[in-house]
Image: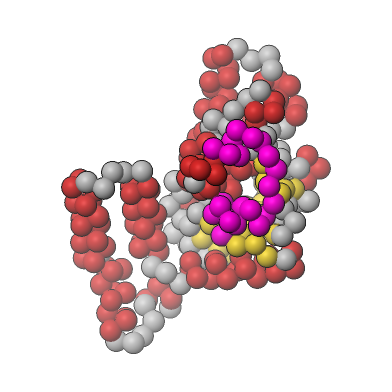
Amino acid sequence: MAHLQVTVRGARATVVLTRPELRNAFNEELIAELSAAFQALGARDDVRAIVLAAEGPAFCAGADLHWMRRMADYTREQNLADAGLLAAMLRAIHDCPKPTVARVQGDVYAGGMGLVAACDMAVAVQGAHFCLSEVKLGLIPATIGPYVQRAMGARAAQRYFLSAERFDAAEALRIGFVHAVVAPEALDARVDELVGALCTNGPAAVRACKRLLHDIAQAPLDEALVARTVEAIADIRASAEGREGVQSFLQKRKPNWLD
């Protein structure tokens, strides 16, 4: 892939944005490649966790300027089609059945915020800065909005969507947008620690857990939701992996997915 490097080592897949000279900004090709990569990796039985990383000083600066210049002349229909591809890419990351970890080694702006938010977990270096800069350009963070608001919470989103202020990694941690902030030299160790934890868990249980999280995120706490959660735990308990996990615990041995 022209703008990505995808590697699989053991149970871990790594997807690296490789446009450092352009601060890993989006264009149509990068969007298509990210969609394809996460769909393909999500379908692989040997992959248990996916790390999204980037080369260079910035993680992702949003839209490529050349792409933005072309968009300036788009019709409404062309804009709808273009935005639809970005939305599909974010959905491919968010809905990937494998757990995803964003390795944030540098600044994250505009559409890049959507990439981080679409991942299940995020670890950032201390020097990284974040910004939802769209309103400065007379635009809005619409396509990335659902993911970013879920990641940082409604109250923080009200501030940063509207003000377009830049904020640092400590603030990103405070509002819950990232899960850990570390020194640059400790970034890989912390990401490895998360991936290691993910890969010791039952793969079918992790897939079911991601579905559960999506189901309950915005659902009202009503009888229908309660019924879905009852069915979910009953199904996983009766599954081969669920039975193996409980038996291995009771028998004080490793489950078969760690063999």
**Foreground residue among 138 and 239:** 138
Residue depicted at 21% across the width and 52% down the height: 226
Residue 80 versus residue 216: which sits nearer the camera? 216
Quadrant of the image occupied by residue 179: bottom right
Q: Position of residue 122 (x, y in %)?
A: 58, 56
- Quadrant where the C terminus sits is bottom left
243 horizontally vs 159: left or right: left
Vertical relation: 158 (above or below) 65: below
The stretch of residues the image draws in magenta is 158-179
Q: What residue is drawn where x is 31% and y is 43%?
A: 219
Decide: is 194 above or below 35: below
Q: Residue at x 53, y 48 (%)?
A: 152
Image: 200 above or below 151:
below
Give the mark count. 0
- Residue 108 horizontal/vertical position (percent): 68, 45
Residue 148 shows in the view: no
- Residue 142 in view in this figure: yes
- Of 93 and 179, nearer the camera is 179
Specify how the rendered protein is coloured: secondary structure
- Does residue 157 belong to the magenta stretch? no
Locate residue 14 relative to residue 239 in the image: left or right.
Answer: right
Furthest residue to the right? 21
Horizontal and vertical percent for residue 46? 48, 62
Q: Nearer the viewer, residue 89 or 217?
A: 217
Residue 234 versus residue 90 in the image, above or below:
below
Is residue 163 rendered magenta in the image?
yes
